[in-house]
Amino acid sequence: MNPELICINTSCRARYGITDVLYNCPKCDGLLEAEFVPPAATPAELKKLWRERRMSNRPVDQSGVWRYREMLPFDDAGLAIVTLREGDTPLLPAPRAAQYAGLDAITFKHQGFNPTGSFKDNGMTCGATQAMRLGMTRVACVSTGNTSASMAAYAAAAGLHPLIFIPNGNISYGKLAQALEYGARTFQVEANFDQILALVRVLAERLGIYLLNSINPFRIEGQKTIMIEMLDQRDWVVPDWVVLPGGNLGNVSAFGKGLRELLAAGFIDRLPRLAVVQAEGAAPFYEFMHRGGTFHAVHHPETLATAIKIGDPVSWPKAQHEIQTTKGVVEYATEQEIADAKAVIGQCGIGCEPASAATLAGLRKLRAAGVVAKDADVVAVLTGNVLKDPDYIYRYHTGALDAPDGHRLQSTFGNAPIVVPNDADEIARLCDKL
Ligand code: F0G
């Protein structure tokens, strides 16, 4: 039996076929999610099977997403899976980052180790596979950069035609370069992310193109395996906190769904608390969760962490549910806090892109406020690779990084390159001073 798509609105809960091309409920416009059908095998059997698959050379077993396929809404025999061996990302202890945040320990789950350098690959392998299952030929997304890079790669691998829509001048060159290299038809639109999402939804409907933004429930399914893999890597020991950056809020929705399903199926006996961190200039979810009332979009979101420069996140109702269910929290971080936290993550030999560093910046604040205990068991998810935005790094370390409002950020942990003459004595003298 195939699972179905279900409207998340408790007053609606309409059900649709798993191969219906839908992103929102046609009855009430609510968000849709894939139904979870608990696997037939016991948790103990599956934990053993998933471990054994790590020794296999089959592409579906090597993928850190499809290895956990019993938890995914794809049970068609002979399904053509589109995989670039995503997932399998490491858990990295980071004592220097822990010290900076005032914690005994922090472990980073680094999604930047994915094939295109971000967590989007976990979702895109499922999104692209669903596009193939539906017989689609064209796929589209609006993106702040990582979704487009990922979609371009998976579409290319699957022989699908990718159409990418990005806010003109507002994504890093590393990400734009990836989309071009993977052969995506790329449109730079004179509008912000939220405006372009509305545009792309109209175009997708009109032209019969499959939409692969995180509103697509199959993207969420793939991203939930980040939590499954994390727990598998920790021998199923549940951390106290899982911290992640928030933009369009697909990832927190995916994490919460995955964790709830693991609890319901008996893989774990409690939920970690989810902590979402937004950038100060693009923090509508923070405002909403702290002030209550109705959800208000930020009309002109601003942050140098362009990946999370989103003012009207579509998945906020799902995210709200997951934060409430896990007794989670939402925090924000300033441009300076993100920049300094990012440099500290670099000093750990780990590195990440700006949006990812919101995790450490937020954790530092949550620790200072006493929300996170000093000895808490914390996993922070780094969402993108350090090389995604080298321009930001160079500016920070050379004292040339300006916030969106024009004020110059401090290079608290700056490390500018030194220009030297071609002279061994002079260089030796400089080295002695280090
Ligand atoms: N971190 C990075 C590096 C991202 O690229 C994104 C989102 C997020 C965090 C936030 O995740 O949207 O699920 O809350 N990037 C999207 C994109 C929007 O188009 O690449 P979210």
Image (cartoon, grey):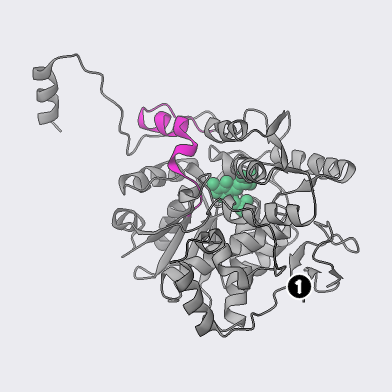
Q: Secondary structure at mark 1?
A: loop
Query: Which of 14/131 is in front?
Result: 131
Query: Which of 384/183 is in front?
Result: 183
- Residue 388 counted in the magenta span: yes
> Dividing the image into 4 quarters, which one contains the C terminus?
top left
> Dividing the image into 4 quarters, which one contains the N terminus?
bottom right
Mark 1 Cα-neighbour bin, 10 Å: few <14, some 14–19, many ≥20: some
Left/right placement of residue 19 relative to residue 274 reads right
Query: Which of 102/226 is in front?
Result: 226
Q: Does residue 174 lie above or below 54 as drawn?
A: above
Q: Amino acid at mark 1?
A: Pro
Question: How many numbered circles does the render carry?
Answer: 1
Q: Would you say residue 219 is visible in this rendering? A: yes
Q: Does residue 150 lie above or below 97 as drawn?
A: above
Q: Position of residue 335 (x, y in %)?
A: 49, 41
Q: Which residues are magenta?
A: 382-403
